[in-house]
Image (tube, rainbow, N blue to C red):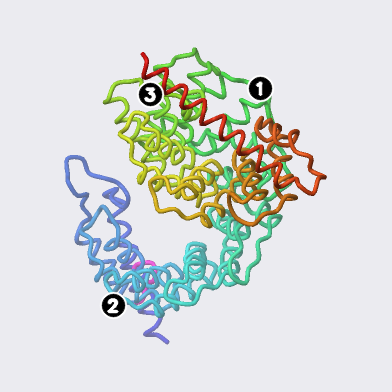
Amino acid sequence: MAKDVRNHEMRAKALKLGLDILGQKNLFVGLIRDQEKPLIPEKAINYFRRAAKLGSVEAQLFLGRLFYQSDNWPLDSYEAAKWFQMAADQDAPEACYMIGLMRRLGQGLAKNLDLGLFYLLKAASQGLVMAQNAVANIYDSGEGLPQDSIEAAKWWRLAAEQGDAQAQRDLGLLYKRGHGQLKSDEAEAAKWLLLAANNGVVDAQFYLSDMYLGHGLEANNAEAYKWSLEAARQGHLEAMFNLSLLLKNGEGAPKDLERAAYWLLQAAEGGHVQAQFNMAIFCQEGYGVAPDTNEALRWLRKAAENGLPEAQYNLALAIIGDSEAALDCSQDSSHGDSMELTEAIHWLREAASVGHVEAIANLGTMYFEAQGVPQDKAEACHWFKMGAELGHSLCQYNYGLILLKGDGVEENPDLGAYWLQKAADQGNSQAQLIMALTSGTELGWAKDIKKAHNWLALAAKQGQSEALFFLESVDWNSPHAAEDLEFEINCRLYLATLKNSQGQEERNVH
């Protein structure tokens, strides 16, 4: 008993002497000018060592911190681990946390994920927030053990209930996405995100605003605007972008194009690619800024260079000289010099390579019809097939027609019919017309006059003049409707052939 008292007195005295020296020299957290490394008197360290060896947790922690991350002393992870371990053996929460962390990282100690978790759990069970967060992250990520969202939620909740804003955010996001056995719970997510948002956590403010846009909560534009503004003021790029949309549309706040342009510009200058594309539109249309085509093109190019397919596609059109719509495939678009066309094709290819279907369709048409590039039907077929498989009706129509005719590829009527039907089902009137004519006659596959009539009616409803002609030229109630339809088709084909040959004769005369 007397020995214990004496040890207590000795370590208390040693600790006091060490702290006194630091206090006198003002070196505990301060810096000495004109020194690369602030200095701590060796005498003070010796007193702390003496107190630590006598069992002072405070001294052990001081030495552990000193060697682990202090600016006042040379770092030594092995020495830090030695002192932290002494304190951890006395169940000091911070020391348990540090030993757990160092074990899992292999810093100053042999790497051991299980032993690291053991010490982290000891610290977390004593209420240390940073340990609770660390344990939650381990269970959430499944690092070194089976992923367990229920256990992650448990530890984040303990930290969040102590007011830790980051834990509130992480718990909110966990409930928002749901994972494993933990089901998504938007109300619970909003509850914790709101706490974190009120504590100034910018990510929480953004995610809360996004939920109020109808992504998980009932849409509330006023709340979405409020939290977008809070996050934007802290530099959150996505929040700036959303804020610009709300202000442009007058949702959640009065419509204000100048403020919308301001926040959009902040996001664009920060590297937000969609904001850069939208900034091009603002400059082109004069939304909140003076109309400026050159500035619009600058932002469009920046977004394209940053990998936005829509910007790449529109930049190609702008270079060619048709920024209003996709390339008019029925007209000659060979205008523009070769360098401009080369750049335009480069951007179309960039967009097409990641599945931008309009770029794919335009490339197919350019190569098939030799618009600005040498004709290459095999290359055209490659792009039309890609677009068809991505569900683009015009590509399906063109690819089906190519296969039906064997134009540049091996003829395949069955596969051609398959893709033409796909295009017709999506409302392509030209495909519907072909489906009608091949369904009702011997020109193609199965003869079905009822199907022919249905396809013609669909195409005519869209204003397809040929379909309207056939609908009006055939008595569909007659038992000879199929023969009548075939006769009308043959007449149209003969007239078309005659017209073409007359045109060729006139060209020969000239």
Foreground residue among 217 and 163: 217
Depth check, front residue: 93 or 211: 211
Q: Tell me whether the residue at label 2 lies in contact with that at label 1, contact meaning CB atoms closer than 8 angstroms.
A: no
Q: What residue does disc 1 label?
A: 255
Q: Position of residue 474 (x, y in %)?
A: 75, 38
**Amino acid at dot 3:** Arg
- Residues shaded magenta: 55-59
Please, is residue 206 above or below residue 104 in the view?
A: above
Which amino acid does the dot numbered 1 rest on?
Lys
Describe the element under mark 1 as helix, strand or loop: loop
Helix, strand or loop at label 3? It is helix
Say left or right for 478 vs 470: right
- Where does label 3 land, which residue? 298
Mark 2 and mark 1: span between their CA atoms? Answer: 61 Å
Mark 2 / mark 3, whichever is N-terminal: 2
Closer to the camera: disc 2 or disc 1? Answer: 1
In this rendering, the answer to whether 2 lies above or below 272 is: below
Asked whether residue 287 appears in the rendered view, the answer is yes
> Whole-percent x and y of residue 217?
71, 48
Please tell me whether the stretch drawn in magenta is mainly helix, strand or loop: helix
Label 2, on which residue? Answer: 110
> Would you say residue 95 sits in the magenta stretch?
no
Q: Few, some or many C-alpha atoms within 10 Å of disc 1 (few <14, some 14-19, many ≥20)?
A: some
Which of 282/83 is in front? 282
Name the residue type under label 2.
Ala
Q: Is residue 466 left or right of residue 374?
A: right
